[in-house]
Amino acid sequence: MSSDDQYFLDLLSKVPHDVARFSHDAAEYSRDIADHIDRQFDAVAASLREHLQSLPWISEYVKEPMLPVRRRAPPPPPGFFEQIQNWVSRNRAITAAIVAFIGTGTFIIWRRRRQYKQKRRAKRAFNGARTEVVILAGSPHSPLTRSISLDLERRGFIVYIPASTLSEEQLIKSELRAEIHPLHLDVTSPTSTASTLHNFTRHLNTPSDLTHATLHLSALILLPSYPPTFPTSPITSLSPSTWSDTLNTHLLYPFTLVHTFLPLLIDQSHLHAPPLIRYYPLETLKKLFIHPFTLLSQTGNQRHQEPTSLILLIPSITPLLYAPCHSAESSIYAALTSYISTLRTELKAAHPHLHVKQLNLGAFDYSSAPGSVRATTALARVNHYDSDSPSPSRRNDFRETGGSPLRVLHNGVFDTVTGRYGSRSTIFLGRGAKTYDFVGKYVPSSVVGFMMGRIERDAVDEGWGLSESWEHFEKDDVSS
């Protein structure tokens, strides 16, 4: 086949495509012409219709009614969610701040509730035996001492309460709890104190027959006197003998306890091994197969020890406000705070594993405390005096306020003993603890006096009258 024939065949093969393209173009052109003609006829018809409508000699019956001009209806007003969406799109920075604030607050509340409901138990030996010991230095007659001792015993601690008389020992034993024991301690006799400390140390270091493990002293807890027994009088009415009795009872006794048990606390803090993973040599691994229970009990006891702590509980409301006629209480707690702070500084470098903590207490509801006299009391008290007599009356009136439940105090003491607060040296527990701390440190004394409803100085000089109207504006403050 020649090239001319091939060229002719190629032309014939393109004919159907050209015909199809021509028909498509013709159809498009015809459609455009038809649309243009329709538009022209519509325009002419509209012009004729308008012209006929304007002629007066044509009857209205014949005329077609004018179609109303179609206008687009206005958009409906935005709804509530649309307004919020528009405001968020216009104020993105404020929206981000609000979301961050709400999210942070929700997380804090959730974490506090979770910590409040968290199950707290002391660590034990491998067979469930108790190995953690706590010394609770408080009056056996105090409902606060009984409440904290029962809670610590329920959580798995062995509790010892110092007692100086036989009646106090019988009172402690009357609780009928297997792990709450009296510890006979007469601080007025150095010989008896040294003998008691020696026997107690030997008891801690003697391995148990069941676990072959020694006991560990977790904490020495110094409790305040509750109900408070401080003299409530003006400074001019306090005699030297009253000051001597108050200092001996509330200041020298805690100092003597700390001085007595401090060497034992230091020794027990050295036994605390922070790392949980230990590497055993070959001889230890051989002993593991020969005497497995003995070795596991000893190493397990060393791994599961609680940190050793010295804890001081202070009712901080009245001392921080420097209330009139409360010089004894303010002086005692200020001296204890300074003593603990100095001791913490001295022990921080030499004995870092011995934690010295201070718990500032707010208002608590003691209605559930065993042996509580009043249904609802607070550690902040208001004393009323007789304005007709030169000396104040001895009646102490406790203000009835809604304080935090005792479970907050129990959880705070347990978390402090087990070291959950970390390196924090001062922990605030109870309603109003942080608020009163801020008020006492940063609010001027004139404002504090006005809020307390303190009367003028001339009225105080005449009758030593005092009427407090402190409104409990405090809020519930609990540390993580």
Image (tube, rainbow, N blue to C red):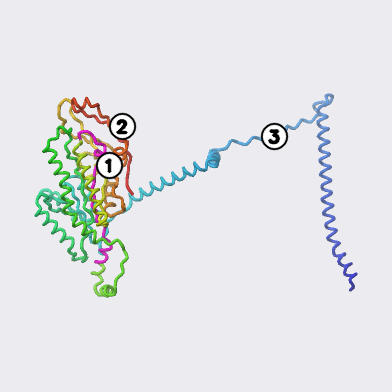
Which class describes the residues within 10 Å of circle 2: few (<14), some (14-19), or many (20+)? Answer: few
Q: Amino acid at mark 2?
A: Val
Badge nearest the viewer, 2 or 1: 2
Task: Say the numbered circle drawn on residue 71.
Answer: 3
Q: Is residue 459 left or right of residue 39?
A: left
Residue nearer the viewer, 409 or 185 = 185
**Residue 376 seen in this snapshot:** no
Which class describes the residues within 10 Å of circle 3: few (<14), some (14-19), or many (20+)? Answer: few
Q: Quadrant of residue 270?
A: bottom left
Element type at mark 3 = loop
Q: Amino acid at mark 3?
A: Arg
- The answer to whether residue 280 is above or below residue 401 is below
The stretch in magenta equals: 297-325
Element type at mark 1 = loop
Q: Looking at the picture, how far across and down is residue 292, in whole percent?
A: 26, 71
Badge nearest the viewer, 1 or 3: 1
Q: Quadrant of residue 300?
A: bottom left
Task: Say the numbered circle drawn on residue 362.
Answer: 1
Q: Looking at the picture, how far across and down is residue 411, in whole percent?
A: 29, 49
Which of the two labelled residues, at mark 2 and mark 3, occupies the earlier sequence position? 3
Q: Which residue is rendered at x = 29% and y = 49% of the image?
A: 425
Q: CA distance from mark 2 to mark 3?
A: 69 Å
Which of the two labelled residues, at mark 1 and mark 3, occupies the earlier sequence position? 3
Give the quadrant of the N terminus.
Answer: bottom right
Q: CA distance from mark 2 to mark 1?
A: 20 Å
Task: Say the numbered circle drawn on residue 447.
Answer: 2
Q: Is residue 113 left or right of residue 381?
A: right
Q: Amino acid at mark 1?
A: Gly
Q: Looking at the picture, how far across and down is residue 59, in whole percent?
A: 82, 26
